[in-house]
Image: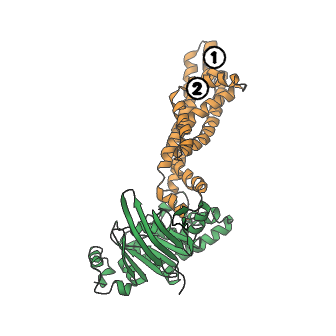
């Protein structure tokens, strides 16, 4: 049994008076696809953003491959913020894909993918572009390298965004509703790239409304509701009848093409 | 209105263009720093920046020029009047450009910055590689506008003894007793310069629009 890629302990997130995450405890296994599902406002995106340190948790700890993310716990139980360079070092182990792609509009596809290699990894322009090209090839977009985001379809933009995240060779990939902003006919190409990545053994944490994807590709399904982690387990258990009543209710509302086969 | 008079006006127009361009460029660099300070969220940076902006927006440029021209020698800095003129124009346009840029920076979608954060950029890299280029695109039309305003406002630097287009026209008008053709010509020269800036700006906007959403 290998060490979990991510360990989440007693994680709490409050925005002012509102508690968005209540005492989350979860382990993300290495080399597997973990899906976070749940209704809108359940806190699943906030949880993922905490893993990327885009949101700072109010209390609790996140450990990524054995290293504390953002804060370390002192013996008296109090948290202390780590220095920025150390936070960046731990964050470097994860790559993130956003719902809105967030490609930089002033750079070509190749520019988007090679930028961090040049700026963060300090590779030469030629080396960075060669590596970036390899990532674009992987998502099937090497012939779109010179295109700007505005010249690409939503699905292509998201695949460039995946290539951009992969370029830094993260150990863990975080997907925040990567297909939710896409037209239905474009989700397939993105889900295919994600499936390929899963087949390669990438550790993935996927926030998704694509229950079909979660059920077929996901190896650990975690269900959040009102900021609480209701249950977590392999899809064969989670989706097997009798199901948790909240999950049943959720599946009724969020029925998609893939989920229909489960009901 | 002879050809010789017109060449004198054109020569003076070169001063006008030179002083304006240099001031706009220096003002732009100062404006980037000012807007970054204003948006830093730290009072020690934002308060002086706000004070700067409100002073230079709140005091007429003519008064600013006279102030700088008299203040610098008073504190022991004897600079040529051209330098005083450029300092005055630069600081004034910096205040306006800073406000425009602040708007541009605030309009950079948060997600684009987050995408840079998760790929390991440090704050300075995010600023230089993501925020500045995108904010620039968003503020280009107002930058063009501001450049035109400064070019026209540069006629005020004659008060510190610079012979630029307007001053030259005045001198020629009083020495030749032909004010109408001379001022008409001066106006025409301003118009041509400003239209050129506007055209260049539109060209730059269009070429940027091709490359971004």
A202 sits left or right of A125 in the view? left
- Residue at (66%, 27%) from the top-left corner? B84
Residue B31 visible to the viewer = yes
Give me the chain letter of mark 1: B
Label 2: how many residues lie within 10 Å, few (<14), some (14-19) or many (20+)? Answer: some
Give me the chain letter of mark 2: B
- Residue at (40%, 58%) from the top-left corner? A15
Quadrant in the rendering for residue A242 = bottom left
Chain rendered green: A
Q: Is residue B27 above or below residue A117?
A: above
Give B179 or A154, whichever is nearer the viewer.
A154
Q: Is residue B176 above or below residue B27?
A: above
- Residue at (55%, 76%) from the top-left corner? A138
Position in image of residue A160 (x %, y %): 51, 68
Numbered disc 1: secondary structure: helix
A249 sits left or right of A134 in the view? left
Of marks 2 and 1, the one in the foreground: 2
Position in image of residue A47 (x %, y %): 43, 68
**How far apart are the two marked residues, 2 and 1, measured between alpha carbons?**
24 Å
Give B172 or B42, whichever is nearer the viewer.
B42
Q: How many marks?
A: 2
Give B196 or A11, whichever is nearer the viewer.
A11
User: Which label number is shown at residue B64?
Assistant: 2
Chain rendered orange: B
B202 sits left or right of B88 in the view? left
Label 1: how many residues lie within 10 Å, few (<14), some (14-19) or many (20+)? Answer: some
Could you tell me which quadrant the N terminus of chain B lies in? Answer: top right
Q: Which residue is mark 1?
A: B171
């Amino acid at each position: 049994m290998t060490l979990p890629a991510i360990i989440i302990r007693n994680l709490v997130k409050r925005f002012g008076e509102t508690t968005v995450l209540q005492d989350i405890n979860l382990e993300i296994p290495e080399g597997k696809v973990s899906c976070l599902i749940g209704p809108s406002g359940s806190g699943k995106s906030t949880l993922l953003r905490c893993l990327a340190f885009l949101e700072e948790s109010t209390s609790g700890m996140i450990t990524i491959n054995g290293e504390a993310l953002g804060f370390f716990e002192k013996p008296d139980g109090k948290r202390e913020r780590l220095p920025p360079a150390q936070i960046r070092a731990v964050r470097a182990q994860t790559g993130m894909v956003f719902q809105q792609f967030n490609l930089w509009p002033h750079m070509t596809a190749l520019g988007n993918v090679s930028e961090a290699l040049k700026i963060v990894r300090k590779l030469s322009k030629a080396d960075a572009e060669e590596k970036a090209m390899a990532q674009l090839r992987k998502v099937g977009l090497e012939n779109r390298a010179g295109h700007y985001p505005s010249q690409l379809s939503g699905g292509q933009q998201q695949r460039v965004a995946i290539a951009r995240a992969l370029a830094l060779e993260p150990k863990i990939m975080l997907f925040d509703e990567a297909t939710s902003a896409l037209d239905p006919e474009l989700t397939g190409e993105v889900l295919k790239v994600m499936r390929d990545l899963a087949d390669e053994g990438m550790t993935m944490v996927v926030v998704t409304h694509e229950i079909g994807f979660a059920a077929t590709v996901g190896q650990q399904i975690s269900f959040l509701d009102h900021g609480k982690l209701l249950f977590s387990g392999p899809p064969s258990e989670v989706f097997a009848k009798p199901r948790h009543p909240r999950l049943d209710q959720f599946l009724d509302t969020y029925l998609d093409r893939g989920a229909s086969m489960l009901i | 209105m002879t050809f010789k008079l017109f060449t004198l006006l054109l020569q003076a127009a070169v001063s006008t263009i030179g002083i304006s361009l240099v001031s706009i460029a220096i003002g732009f660099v100062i404006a980037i720093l000012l807007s970054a300070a204003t948006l830093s969220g730290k009072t020690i940076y934002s308060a002086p920046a706000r004070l700067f902006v409100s002073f230079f927006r709140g005091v007429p440029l003519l008064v600013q020029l006279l102030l700088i021209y008299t203040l610098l020698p008073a504190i022991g800095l004897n600079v040529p009047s051209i330098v005083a003129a450029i300092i005055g124009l630069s600081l004034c346009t910096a205040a306006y450009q800073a406000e425009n840029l602040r708007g541009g920076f605030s309009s950079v979608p948060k997600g684009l910055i987050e995408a840079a954060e998760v790929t390991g950029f440090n704050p300075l890299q995010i600023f230089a590689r993501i925020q500045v280029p995108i904010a620039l695109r968003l503020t280009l039309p107002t930058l063009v506008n501001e450049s035109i305003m400064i070019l026209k406002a540069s006629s005020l630097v004659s008060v510190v003894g610079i012979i630029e287009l307007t001053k030259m026209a005045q001198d020629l008008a009083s020495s030749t007793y032909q004010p109408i053709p001379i001022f008409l010509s001066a106006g025409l020269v301003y118009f041509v310069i400003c239209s050129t800036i506007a055209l260049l700006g539109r060209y730059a906007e269009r070429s940027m629009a091709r490359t971004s959403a």
